[in-house]
Image: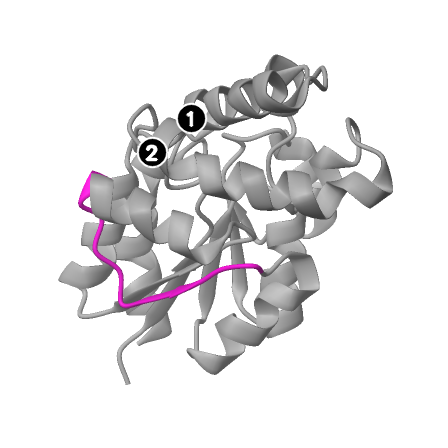
């Protein structure tokens, strides 16, 4: 069986801060609700509703979330670049004959738009999953490694019995990722190909 490696999306494969900030700014302008978008993008990772709860009353969150997701394609895709080393990390898995899956808390259609826009081809994509719930997709696809930037990603990997590879490129530092149980902490994805080259023979 080919090795399957899972990746988180936001702040792991893509730097979605510029795009998400733009989408929040537009949502704020439309709704008249003050949203500190600069603050919001410092805590990416958890589901959208968690962040919206900081700005909207509970009864308004479903409508605000729907409108945010509708605005997202026009405001968030173009400004969002790939993280350094993202394409090379995916290529390293493919060069070893492996499969790449992306498991994210993001709305799946918008996640697909990011991957297509950046030309990052993956074998499977699953959205709307956070923390322990990520294990559902990781287990289904047989992922033995999951790469992410958040404590929630570490939890998802460990729940699935996968090796947790963490990168402190999001809101969580390296020490906190280690404390949460990450098996491997890399500075960023530029270090992934070299690490993976050593990991594959070990697995074999």
In the picture, the disc for residue 77 is 2
Q: Secondary structure at mark 1?
A: helix
Q: Residues within 10 Å of mark 2 (few under 14, many from 20)?
A: many
Q: Is residue 38 magenta?
A: no
On the question of residue 202 being in view, the answer is yes
Query: Mark 2–mark 1 contact, CB under 8 Å?
Result: yes
Q: Is residue 160 above or below residue 11?
A: below
- In the rendered image, the residue lying farthest to the left is 95
- Circle 1 residue: 19
Residue 33 located left or right of residue 102: right
- x, y percent for residue 88: 21, 43
Locate the C terminus and report the quarter of the image it occupies: bottom left
Q: Is residue 99 left or right of residue 105?
A: left
Residue 184 or residue 45, whichever sits in front: 45
Dividing the image into 4 quarters, which one contains the N terminus?
bottom left
Classified by dominant secondary structure, the portion drawn in magenta counts as loop
**Position in image of residue 183 (x %, y %):** 57, 54
Q: Nearer the viewer, residue 36 or 93?
A: 36
Q: Which residues, given as a range, are shown in magenta?
A: 118-128
Q: Please tell me how crowded label 1 is: few (under 14), some (14-19), or many (20+) other residues with Cα within 10 Å.
A: many
């Amino acid at each position: 069986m080919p090795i399957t490696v899972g990746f988180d999306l936001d702040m792991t494969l893509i730097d979605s801060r510029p795009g998400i900030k733009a989408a929040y700014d537009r949502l704020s302008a439309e709704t008249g609700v003050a949203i500190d978008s600069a603050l919001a993008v410092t805590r990416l990772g958890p589901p959208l509703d968690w962040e919206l709860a900081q700005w909207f009353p509970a009864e308004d969150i479903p409508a605000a979330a729907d409108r945010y997701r509708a605005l997202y394609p026009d405001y968030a895709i173009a400004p969002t670049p790939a993280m350094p080393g993202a394409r090379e990390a995916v290529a390293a898995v493919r060069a070893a004959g492996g499969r790449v899956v992306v498991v994210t808390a993001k709305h799946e259609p918008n996640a697909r738009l990011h991957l297509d826009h950046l030309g990052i081809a993956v074998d499977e994509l699953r959205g709307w999953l956070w923390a322990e719930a990520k294990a559902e997709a990781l287990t289904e696809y047989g992922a033995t490694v999951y790469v992410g930037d958040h404590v929630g990603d570490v939890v998802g990997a460990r729940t699935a019995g996968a090796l947790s590879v963490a990168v402190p490129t999001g809101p969580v530092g390296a020490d906190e990722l280690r404390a949460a149980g990450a098996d491997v902490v890399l500075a960023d994805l530029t270090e992934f190909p070299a690490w993976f080259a050593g990991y594959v023979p070990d697995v074999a």
